[in-house]
Image (cartoon, helix red, strand yellow):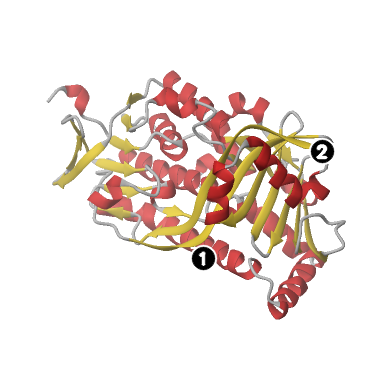
Amino acid sequence: MTETDHYDVIIAGAGLAGATFALAAAQGGLKVVLVDPQPFPAQLAPTFDGRSTAIAFSTFRMLDALGVGEGLRPYACRMDRILVTDGRRPGAASPAASSAFLRFDADEIGERTDGEPLGYMVENRRIRVALSEAVTAAEIEVRAPASVDRVGTGPGLATVTLADGAELRAPLVVGAEGRGSRVRREAGIDTVGWGYGQSGVVATVAMGRDHGHVAHEYFLPSGPFAILPLTEQRASLVWTETTRRAEALKAASDEAFHAHLMRRFGDFLDDVSVVGPRFVYPLSLQLAEQLTAPRVALIGDAAHAVHPVAGQGLNMGLKDAAALAEVLVEAVRLGEDIGSETVLDRYARWRRFDNAALAAGFDGFVRLFSNDIAPVRLARDLGIAAVNRIAPLRRAFMHEAGGATGDLPRLLRGEAL
């Protein structure tokens, strides 16, 4: 065993959450290694991840503190307003549209956010490139392609055996490899959850008119449909279909896909053209029953994979990364064993309630809105109208969506570790 095979933290998964955590931990002086089955350059290809992410303004502070924000800003589109409508078809001007709507405006909370928008829309591929450059600049070791085969734990140390037989040792292993986390399975942590029988169809479109930095979300009987502003007068379209219909769209020709898009949403979208590849992602809820196990911690989708209805999945994962990094760095400064139950329990207590509450809230939101039952529609429309008229409640929703509430890790306050 060579000296370079020993680390402070072994991170399985070099995706968005894993790479961000690696940067945060390294900023705090920890020696980390990233392990991922995908070659790092492959994750940067435009065809690898077609999604765009709403980054909360507090999360962008974290990226700034880690030296990633500057490289992202040219590709980050402000979201200054969000319009939420409950209807039977998209388009506020549609005769069938409901009068129930919510309007969130960044100006309403500007005095407390120093003029920040409600969030920034950024294509995931741009985030991956910025993180890759930062990881390289920080000289963080990346082992890819490489996959975790086994995780063994003992007194004071965990041993990760890779598929090629190599062994890595550290006091702590972090699972950040998404829903199918090998680290989570090796740690014996079970999950709870369910599928929605739906998939999210994602496409980027060039728009025939300026989007005005406004995000639209329409709750239709089949599921939510979102128009999310991107740079260069483009938008990311995310609409929910049954899994069978979504798979048919995935297999359709470009012409058939565009024809379906315009038949379904053309009245509202006006003059749009699809640019780049399209993607289909199955939708489900999955929560790990525990965030930690002996010498193991979970972050991101390995810990909680939620419905994208509120665009908070990545923000939750990066908040995990910030909280865990802060706990570990403080433990090192106190001379503690960073993989001990005492230290890891601090992380679990910090993040457990927030993750579970948000996941349950998003699930309830989807179930409440993804139907067309008359009494339910009436009740939710009355609720939407009430919230829209109560300014303090509306502002509270905006602060929560911006990630600026609760016990924030230092990185989300823009402070370096």
Distance of label 2 from label 1 (alpha carbons): 37 Å
Question: x, y percentage for residue 396?
Answer: 69, 60
Residue 67 in sight:
no
Decide which of 187, 412 is in the foreground and name it. 187
Label 1 is placed on what type of residue?
Ala
Decide which of 102, 271 is in the foreground and name it. 271
Q: Can you identify the residue that label 1 sits on?
A: 360
Q: Quadrant of the N terminus?
A: top left
Which mark is first along the chain, 1 or 2?
2
Question: x, y percentage for residue 287?
Answer: 41, 59
Question: x, y percentage for residue 228?
Answer: 70, 43
What residue is drawn where x is 75% and y is 45%?
A: 262
What residue is drawn where x is 47% and y is 37%?
A: 16
Residue 318 in sight:
yes
Tag 2–tag 1 contact (CB < 8 Å): no
Question: x, y percentage for residue 62?
Answer: 55, 37
What residue is drawn where x is 54% and y is 58%?
A: 198
Q: Which mark is residue 11?
A: none
Left or right, 353 with respect to 36, comes to: right
Left or right, 108 with respect to 205, comes to: right
What residue is drawn where x is 74% and y is 72%?
A: 383
Q: Can you identify the residue that label 2 sits on?
A: 271
Q: Quadrant of residue 141?
A: top left
Left or right, 392 with respect to 223, comes to: right
Label 2 is placed on what type of residue?
Asp
What kind of element bears circle 1? helix
Decide which of 233, 23 is in the foreground and name it. 233
- Select label 2 or label 1 by which is in front: 2
